[in-house]
Image (spheres, rainbow, N blue to C red):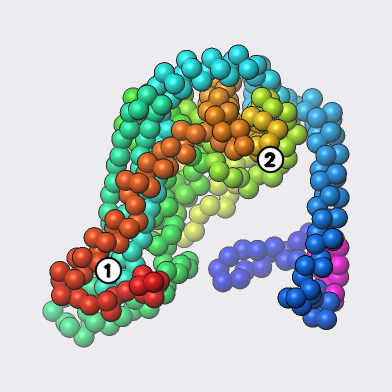
Amino acid sequence: MDSDITLLGQDISEISETDLERAFGEPLSTTLDIDQWQSGDSLAGVSGRLKREIEEARHAEDDVRRTIRKEIFPRLTAWENAPKGPDLAGVWVASPDEVDSTLRGRLFAGHVEAADGTSKLIDTLPITIAQIGVCTTTYRGDQGEWGHRMYRRDFRGKSGDDIADMIAMLEARRDRTGFEKSSRRDRFTDLLRRAFMTWAERAVLTRKSRAEWRMGHGNPLAYELLTGSGLAALIEPSIELLSELILQHKKFVFVPSSSSDRLIATIGSALKPLEYAIVSDSRAYLNRVLEGGYRGVTSGYDKAKTALEKFAAAVQEEVVVGVYRVSNIGPAHIFYAHREFAHQAALIAMADGALMEHRGFPMLIDLADALCKAMFHGETLSTATDLAFLDAGSTLDFATERMTR
């Protein structure tokens, strides 16, 4: 069994030389023999091997698909984490008429509203500015925009002891990372900014949207929110928000751009066009969050975990995970929905994805993303920041090299 080691604060699994050889088909000694490496001017000569490896992998994957359809699909209803209830788990086929009816009757009629967010960070020595924006859109032409800016300064006020204040400021800056970099020491830069954007997307869908169906990006049970991203106080408001969406509204469908769940992705690769599979509920995922999603021993985390355990028990069987395929040329996509409306959610995602067969991804989410980037363009924040510095009498000494390219 692989042992766990810690590198720079991150848990990773130890890899043996046998694991390496099994994965890449060559021993470590070959990988470390620099004479076995190709020089730059001869890399073109490896294209034959590249083509051969891809062809073999493709043929092997075709065999996997045939086996999955024959042996695994019939067993989906009996899987340990399969959603409970009749006519839920398993593989289903949507007819072209059902997809067309959903497209015209729900999507084009304006009964589905999608939300997506974006964020921009301006990081300088005296101040860090984080801008978060969320936009919603429907095919009826309705749209909404919500934005927020957060300002961080290491030196905000004086206690009367100039030397102590200055040392405190220097210590604070030492604990932060370099410009345009991130680390576990400075969670604000990436983790919390992403968490606030994720929260805002779900808050807008839940509390601002008036459409019958709400479409979101990612997993509704977002990991960033359920773990607090290092901020224990974020967990309980997130639980309250997600409870409204999942347990009260129920009519939602979330589609991530990608997923770390290769098992469901492999099942999706075996689907034919207009097929979808409902594979599991959220018990296993929430158990992983409860077992390993926390850092620290503060009372805030103890209280939050108690609330999260209660929340997980309430929603773990309500949110189901599925996968759909629109066409032969596009990839399969994972989706999340409430168990009571899982089939309708799959049809909505498929109908919207059918508008771009080569992607199969819901176009409404793409439109919300495009609107958000237009409304909250990074250059807008950058320009306003530059002008504010100039008005304050500053030169370009605050700018990093990338900012002045």
Q: Residue at x 16, y 82 (%)?
A: 161
Q: Which residue is mark 2?
A: 265
- The answer to whether residue 82 is left or right of residue 239 is right
Looking at the rendered structure, the secondary structure element under dot 1 is: loop
Q: Nearer the viewer, residue 226 or 106?
A: 106
Q: Residue at x 50, y 54 (%)?
A: 294
Q: Position of residue 114 (x, y in %)?
A: 42, 33
Residue 275 falls within the magenta-colored stretch: no
Q: Residue at x 40, y 22 (%)?
A: 110
Q: Amino acid at mark 2?
A: Ala
By secondary structure, the bulk of the magenta-drawn segment is best described as helix
Q: Nearer the viewer, residue 385 or 356?
A: 356
251 w.r.t. 230: above or below: above
Which quarter of the figure is the C terminus placed in? bottom left
Q: Quadrant of residue 42?
A: bottom right
Residue 127: numbered disc: 1
Residue 18 falls within the magenta-colored stretch: yes
Q: Amino acid at mark 1?
A: Ile
51 w.r.t. 123: above or below: above
Label 2 crowd (10 A; few <14 / some 14-19 / many >=20)? some
User: Distance from label 2 to label 1 (Cα)?
Assistant: 42 Å
* Segment tinted magenta in the rendering: 16-30
Q: Position of residue 355 (x, y in %)?
A: 54, 29
Residue 141 in view, yes or no: yes
Q: Quadrant of residue 359?
A: top right
Residue 321 in view, yes or no: no
